[in-house]
Image: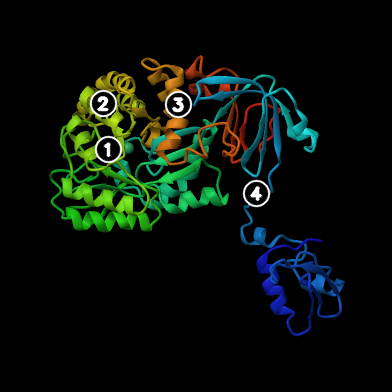
Amino acid sequence: MSLGGELWHSTTEWEYAGTSTRISSSPTNTTCMTGPDGGLLKCSVFPFGVGELLLYTPTPKENQQNHTANMDISRIIKPWKPNSQRNLVFVNATIVDPAEGKLIPNATVRIAEGKIIQIVTDGSTTITDDVPEENVIDLDGKYLCPGLIDCHVHIAVVPGESSLQAYSDMSDAVSLLRQPYLLKSMLDRGFTTIRDCGGAGLAIKEAVVDGVIPGPRVFIAGHALSQTGGHGDLRGSHNSQQCCGGSVSGISRVVDGPAECYKYAREELRQGADFIKIMGGGGVASPTDRIEHVQFSDEEIKAIVTVARNAGTYVTSHSYTPQAIQQAIKLGVRGIEHGNLVDLETAKMMAEMDVFLTPTLITHVMFQQMKFLSDDSAAKNEEVLKKGLETLKMAVDAGVTVCFGTDLLGPMHFAQSKEFSVRNSVLTPLQILRSATVNAARLLMQENMLGQVNEGFAADLLILKQNPLEDITILDQVEDHILAVIKDGRVATSRWDKFKVDV
Ligand SMILES: [Zn+2]
């Protein structure tokens, strides 16, 4: 019987301290113990002199008293913890390599402990020898693609309401209770990683890491930082209520002046932000600013960039216009969100400075189709949508590293994968796949872990029926083309009877 686990060891030893006997025998650091009524506790070897008791045979009397006997203590504390992983081996896989822009046929890919541990491409399948037959899956030439990364989402603006107004009255609790639904639906669509650009908190991120709920791995900004009257300030012009520095406004926090910028950037990082998001210019859905506004002063942006850099991370800015983009990147901002109105000069500058661009075109399409905006906002939306596709192509041609983003709010989330089809009208399938894999991984500073089917990388994988490098819009036809979604080495979603979902 195995009763591994530090907690068991320490509590049990304490409980039995009065009656147990510890025998130490050098030189092997072997420790043996006897139980309260003479039951045998087997010997363990502690390489460093202390450690956990691995094997223990309790007497029948102890068994009656000890309700945790035969149980893994870590699963008592966290009963939702999934079972240990199956080690899977895929044979006859066609690996999709977005970094090199090629396919690797006849591959055998072995995954264990959440990682890709071995890839064999010479046709040999010897690495399957020690894996049970049911864990060896013949992909029959089907495509093994890296899991997708959406670099601009807002999971706190959950589905369930039909107007944007309803979200300003929604409590955090209502939003939080709906977020697991949203995360699972993103995973089902093939997104194994998301970057939340405002609104998501540490609790939901940790719930996914801990296995309480299924979902993509989540990188968060906490609250986006906005100036008074900026894109993140939800108060209308007739609302004269003063808000104090740092107060939360929907998915944002309103801050003014370098002092508040220092303080609340640090506050977001303290509360678990992986990076800092600023509202560096006007936006579509905000009531009192215009799209051409530049927001925040140089001093304010400099303060926020300093805080992020000191913490080993970066700032990304919501910016549409060349003026807003140039101001941000000259001050050290590393990412630009949306960027629909960027011009050639600014795009070249971005390429030179290795600044990432994350366009989010589908949100403008859906705003239009769902009539989700006021008349004022709808006019702003139309302008940025028209320019968005043109400038996306221009930016890619200028050498800017472009990432995949969606920025969908409320009931529009269902359209997440349609961004692939929208981009397809101006970019090649490889350019688009890179934006959702290798480019996105670099933006997240996870380029050695995410975005590729490579040894040592996380086993975040999609099984596809067709080649996405030939037709990227298959990723928008989820039910027909994504046969399985694997995250951290576990089958999270299956539409193929060869794959059983791991729970
Ligand atoms: Zn956004």
Total number of numbered discs in the rendering: 4
Label 1 – label 2 distance at C-alpha: 19 Å
**Mark 4 surroundings: few (<14), some (14-19) or many (≥20) residues within 10 A:** some
Q: Amino acid at mark 2?
A: Lys
The tag earlier along the polypeptide, 1 or 2, is: 1
- Label 3 or label 2, whichever lies nearer to me, is 2
Residue ID for mark 2: 348
Q: Going by the image, does 103 lie left or right of 231?
A: right
Q: Which mark is residue 434?
A: 3
Q: Residues within 10 Å of mark 2 (few under 14, many from 20)?
A: some
Mark pair 3, 2: CA separation: 20 Å
Please give the residue where the numbered disc 4 appears in the rendered image: 82
Does the Cβ of the disc 4 residue fall within 8 Å of ligand 1? no
Name the quadrant of the C terminus. top right
Q: Is mark 1 within 8 Å of ligand 1?
A: yes
Q: Residue furthest front?
A: 27
Q: Residue at x 35, y 42 (%)?
A: 197
